[in-house]
Amino acid sequence: MAHQQYTFMTPTDEEAFVRVLARNVFEVYPRRVPPDWKTFRLSVETIAQLPERDVYLVASDLGPAHVDAIKRGPDKGFWRIDEVRSPVLFWERSARNEDDELLSGQLWAELDVTEQTGRKNAAPAAFRARVLEIGAWLTKTFRKGDPKGSWIGPDAAREVKEGRLVLREDFERNGRIVVPQGMQRPKDPIGRKFRR
């Protein structure tokens, strides 16, 4: 089973998150890797170089990034990271939509043996420990979201409480509005109740 957490992060929250990630070696790759891609190590100084939304973070000190060539379709000629064979953490960054709402992102890593992905061996113990440590930091530092299932960065939670930010789920169509746990949920502007 994949280890997955949905998150909401402002740029301030991202910087704090990257400081934690940078304690370990993570090399940055986009979702579709151009043939001339020059990888770099994740750090606070390299945040501006990160791909806009989808980021692969390869723990290159624990193993290499396994890539496969894309042979058909619009991405022909690019490479893709093999998420099963590589020690990789997928980070979908939060982004603003056309209504200036902050959309959810996620962290995802494949750690276990699964029939669906064809993984025959579990992820290396050192990589598993690293991913679980990052997840533990996140659940300790971030606020629980309401409805359940997501984690809200401290800066994002503060902006929501001050009425300057709206959070919206992005993992399903017409995602629900999310607030920090314990905060009053807003009414739908057209009078309908939000789905739970």
Image (cartoon, helix red, strand yellow):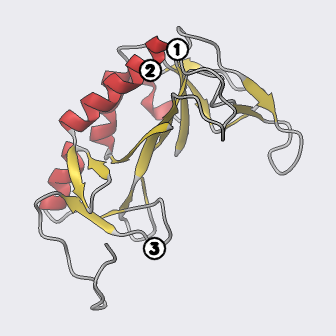
Q: Residue at x 34, y 37 (%)?
A: 14
Quarter location, residue 135: top left
Residue 102 position in % (x across, y down): 36, 58
Sequence-earlier tag: 3 or 2: 2
Q: Residues within 10 Å of mark 3 (few under 14, many from 20)?
A: few
Q: Nearer the viewer, mark 3 or mark 1?
A: 1
Residue located farthest toward the top when viewing the structure as drawn? 61
Q: Is residue 74 left or right of residue 5?
A: right
Give me the residue at 43% from left, 45% from top. Answer: 106
Could you tell me the amino acid type at mark 2?
Arg
Return the residue at label 3: 174
Query: Which amino acid lies under the numbered mark 3 shown in the image of this protein?
Result: Asn
Residue 115 sits in quarter: top right
For badge 1, the amino acid type reads: Pro
Contact check, label 3 and label 2, Cβ < 8 Å: no
Residue 25, can we see it?
no
What residue would you read off at disc 2? 128
Visible in this render: residue 17? yes
Question: Relative to residue 134, is residue 94 depicted above or below?
Answer: below
Judge the density around disc 1: few (<14), some (14-19), many (≥20) Cα neighbours within 10 Å: few
Crowding at label 2, few (<14), some or many (≥20) Cα neighbours within 10 Å? some
Q: Residue at x 28, y 84 (%)?
A: 193
Up-down relation of residue 63 to residue 174 (above or below): above
Look at discs 3 and 2 and give the one toward the viewer: 2
- Residue 63: horizontal and vertical position, in percent? 60, 11
Helix, strand or loop under label 3: loop
- x, y (%) of residue 122? 55, 21
Residue 124, label in figure: 1
User: Picture coordinates of residue 72 (x, y %)?
Assistant: 89, 46
> What whole-number distance in Å separates the C-alpha atoms at marks 3 and 1?
38 Å
